[in-house]
Amino acid sequence: MSYYQVPIGPQHPAIKEAFQFNFILDGEVIVDVKPRLGFVHRGIEKGMELRTWVQGIFLAERICGICNVPHTTCYCLAVEKLYDIDVPERAKYLRIIINELNRIHSHLLWIGILGMELGFHTLFMYVWRDREKVMDLVEMISGNRVTPSMNCIGGVVYDITPEMIPIIKRNLDYLEERTKYYKSVLEEDPSIRARTVDVGVLSTEKALDLCAVGPTARASNVKSDVRFDDPYTLYDTIDFNLITYDTCDVWGRAMVRVDETLESISVVRQALDKMRPGPINVKVKRIPPVGEATARVEAPRGELLHYVKSDGKETPYRAKMRTPTMANIPSLCEMLKGYHIADIPAIVASIDPCYCCTERVIFIDPNRGEKWVWSYDELRNYSRKYYGVGV
Amino acid sequence: MAMIREVFKHLFKRPVTVKYPFEKTPIAERYRGKHEFYVDRCVGCGLCARECPALAIELVPSDKNVNGRIPVFYLDKCIFCGQCERICPRAAIRLTKFYELASPDRKTLVYSAG
């Protein structure tokens, strides 16, 4: 029996990272997937070694455009462990607020992306319109829509004034109402259900075996969330639920994210109520003492880990990050097996990858010696035609 | 089909997008835009150039202060993080709300209080 081999990737200029999949196909059905990483190696870890501890925050912020706040939080938590200082309580709540606002905007963005991948542009447009509300909040608090530069070593930079609290609560009420509506859309819409239910199944055992993290693991009924397992910045004082679904498919991953958005909204409200006036940061020396430290943070995509080592100089001796998409790639390869080419966009999108970069698809038929190239748009259009929606 | 009511509800409403150069959305009070540099306050300590994560600040010789140097801002390199504003001991740097910095020539993006 002959198989097709379909490399997808590695380049897509519009999206952050490049990645290549080599699909081994039996007709339409994916038999095996071989991932290839390393196309967007930017040398950030080396770059951290060449920059001072403070400059490292801004480099860490630029590792990922969408989940930049967890990256800075994680880096600052690790460096604060080196200094062995305790951040003021208000700063911890402010960190929770800005992290959860980031999670809301990341998850809403993802729901829009899912709609776009399925050819449901209406959902995409409406979700992204409502996402502007949370972007406005981040801009109001920090001065920038996407990269707030909120964290500093020893606390946070920008405070939330009493005048801002009613605006935040008003926008959150609006967002809660809209998110509930999108949840009902995802639950009821027959075309979304047809494309996502029982697609990309990753069983609980497989998810545990392959060390899935974040919403990918939680949709496979694995109770894993750093905010519960290893609470940081006073997450243990806040009452919220760990969302899991046992459907193990793309639909479950969508529902986990929608429900988490609702939970995040309630977390922000609680943190706003629990905040007491006080200092928002502590002054630290320019150079941390010799030592090494790690910190873990629950980013929107899953568990994020930062490691820093200081040898008493102005720059870190070593900095290392492990990002959630990296941890989810083995699970992604597993969940693609047995599904059709047309399911690729939905399944790849379902882990909320930081790449989604399948610009070029080469189809090779070894029997006929034929070769043809599809762009990612063509692949997406093919998948929409295959299912007869949104062409 | 679940969104069809939503679509009809918005059919006769104005688009949410704004026609940008003619109509502008309000900017947040804390927005970080183009720098404003107060040369009379600057002591030439050079902290801003040392801390800038994007290496967008360069010190040039000047007779305006005792240290004999003032910063020049390369706005094309700047990432508008606000670190220079925070680190400045004399509050000589302030980030304004001005954001329309697009230019065909990057030489026009060098800002200094000459």
Image (cartoon, coloured by chain):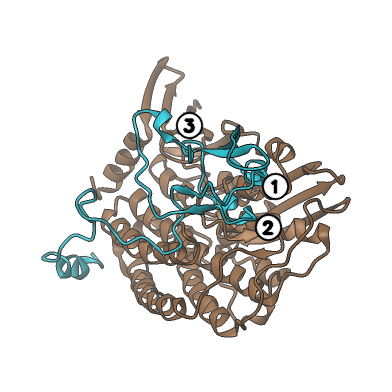
Give the amino acid type for the residue marked by disc 2 in the picture: Cys
Front position among marks 3 and 2 = 2
Quarter residue B106 falls in = top left
* Side of A197 where B59 appears, left or right: right
Q: Is residue B48 above or below residue A246?
A: above
Residue drawn at x 59%, y 51% as measured from the top left: B83
Which residue is under mark 2?
Answer: A74
Q: Label 2 neighbourhood size at 10 Å, few (<14), some (14-19), many (20+)?
A: many
Quarter residue B12 falls in = bottom left
- What colour has chain B? cyan
Viewer can see residue A205:
no
Residue A256 pos. (x, y %): 50, 67
Instruction: Tell me whether the residue at label 2 lies in contact with that at label 1, contact meaning CB atoms closer than 8 angstroms.
Output: yes
Q: Label 3 neighbourhood size at 10 Å, few (<14), some (14-19), many (20+)?
A: many
The one of B68 and A74 positioned closer to us in this rendering: B68
Give the amino acid type for the residue marked by disc 3 in the picture: Gly
Residue A65 pos. (x, y %): 51, 48
